[in-house]
Amino acid sequence: MTMFSFNRVDARPDASARNPSTAASDRQPFAVRLASDVLVAAGILALFGLIAWILPAIGEPIGPKGVPSQVSTDLADLPYYALRSVFRMFVALFFSLVFTFIYGTAAARCRRLSRVLIPLLDILQSVPILGFLSATITIWMVLFPGTMLGVEAASIFAIFTSQAWNMAFSFTRSLTSEPTELDEAARSLQLTRWQRFWTLDVPNAMIPLLWNCMMSVGGGWFFLTASEMISVNNRTYALPGIGSFVAQAAAEENLAAICWAIVTMVLVVLLIDVLLWKPLTAWAEKFRITQSESAVRKTSVVLTIIRQSHIDEMVAWLFRPVGDLLDTLTRPLGRTGGRWAADVKSARSRALDVVFTVLVLAACTFGLVQLMLVIHRDAGFGELGQAFVLGMVTFLRVALLTLVCSVIWVPIGAMIGMNPRVSRFMQPIVQVLASFPSNFTFPFVTLWFVACSVDINWGSILLMALGTQWYILFNVIAGASQIPDDLREMTRSFQLGRWQRWRDLILPAVFGSWVTGGITAAGGAWNASIVSEIVSYGRHTLTASGLGAYIAEATESGNTVKTIIGVTVMSVFVVAVNRLFWNPLQRMAERRFTLN
């Protein structure tokens, strides 16, 4: 059996003989390396300077009038607002990444916990951002009393809830679909769990995880308005940011301010793509599983400058003691195991499984009974039935959206991912489209709907698609980019026709990625319904019939029971669809369409 291996290079200074990029940088003239060092140092200093400039405003005390309910629409404030929004976005992304590593590893490696964590992830991704905000805003205000830090924490947590779930799904799938050869190699080398995590688990998941990080940032931008202009329990908390700027401009019917915010947003997205995503996607190419190097390599000017500098050597020198310490501390955790063993269970193991299942069922039953008692006492089951009817309406919108987006974006994503030249050209375009908060255009769309008499019940599908279709596209691009060059060359050697190539290689290779994208796109569409089924601009407000509008109205009016009913019904729909439709497809992908 052929042994696949990562096209991965050692980043340590003494590995230059094995690392072509490092060796090439060592051959650069001294002046070039010095200029690179200066540029990298200037970039690091600028980054820390901007953070130091922002931090005092984040923790400033709340004034005598309380937390502001609106922000200024002065155009001079736009750069500062954009910077505040970017800061929140990447703080939330950092916590999402930490959550992904911990949660995804536990869900993939612990057999008993997986029975709880994976269904729980379905529920968590189905809870709308307003549901999290209404339940946690008071907690954050209590944890950080008297300062704006409480509202900032609530906003960052809200952005986190729009980012973390698709990353966790992607990482879990990568762990459960690792090539058998690499799993056996890790066992043969007797790697500790810590060593395996950074040597195999993270590198194997790097490409899809990176694309899902991009998608998570895009999802965070989509909910930026709701997370910066927080309207819950009959109160509005406004934070300086580009999302709250657009919300305030829409309330004032200031189209010029909205247009300038859109221009600013496009510039921000392009800058992030050039400085962060393009270098990361080029760097992540070394983690592709292949036996031959791609003929067309992804490049990045920023990555080239970093490689020509001494920053990698300095980082390795600074963090090697930390890595050695963590390696020593984690050795008592034992040697690694990939997936849980398929051996025959002992009587003790079966007994523990029974006890664990009974405890989980008891906890779920107790929670369900308490929930039903609250609904019966404060609202009645008639309200619950109405919410289920509205949930069915939104479900039909989500199903139609997922089907149409899959038909459109699967072939496009596969072509982008398999062609490095197309990928290099299309990545910034796709990144702008995905990261651009489409709800910034909702005021214009609302005016168009009003002028053309478009029914919002159909128009809301378009609004939901603007923010969620990219989950499918990004996951398919990531899946297609992981197809080994050897298999592509084999299809050319056998002179397979276009249809045979798609049927026998491309579609099976991206099937698992499409399933992951479909799960997160459907979950994101449910979440997006809360901002897509009610749209407004000045005096015009359009409301669709659906569960998203039901939850948005209940949250804004402070009706806690109706909010709980809406969130519960949405969770039931999402979990049911995942259990009955997506999970069988995911098991089929793991069983039939992995590179083992």
Image: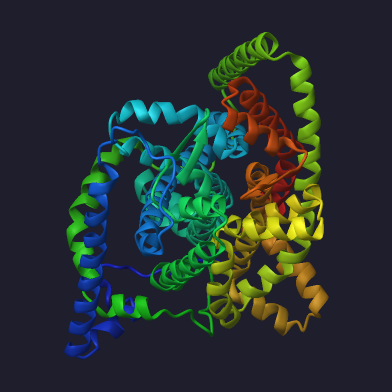
Camera-side residue of 384 and 92: 384
Q: Nearer the viewer, residue 112 or 208?
A: 208
> Between residues 559 and 209, which one lies in front from this camera angle?
559
Instruction: Name above or below for residue 211 compared with residue 40.
Output: above
Image x and y of residue 204, in percent: 49, 58
Side (left or right) of 315 relative to 428? left
Q: Residue at x 75, y 47 (%)?
A: 398
Q: Residue 329, image x and y in percent?
A: 25, 40
- The answer to whether any part of residue 562 appears in the image is yes
Q: How many marks?
A: 0
At 68% across and 38% down in the image, what residue appears? 548
Residue 219, position as x, y percentages in the image:
55, 53
Residue 312 visible within the image: no
Q: Position of residue 312 (x, y in %)?
A: 25, 69
Q: Nearer the viewer, residue 87 or 531?
A: 531
Quarter of the figure with residue 369: top right
Q: Is residue 492 above or below residue 97?
A: below
- In the rendered view, how is the structure colored? rainbow
- Whether residue 207 sits left or right of residue 473 in the image: it is left
Residue at x 70%, y 28% (from the top left corner): 569
> Which image quadrant: the N terminus?
bottom right
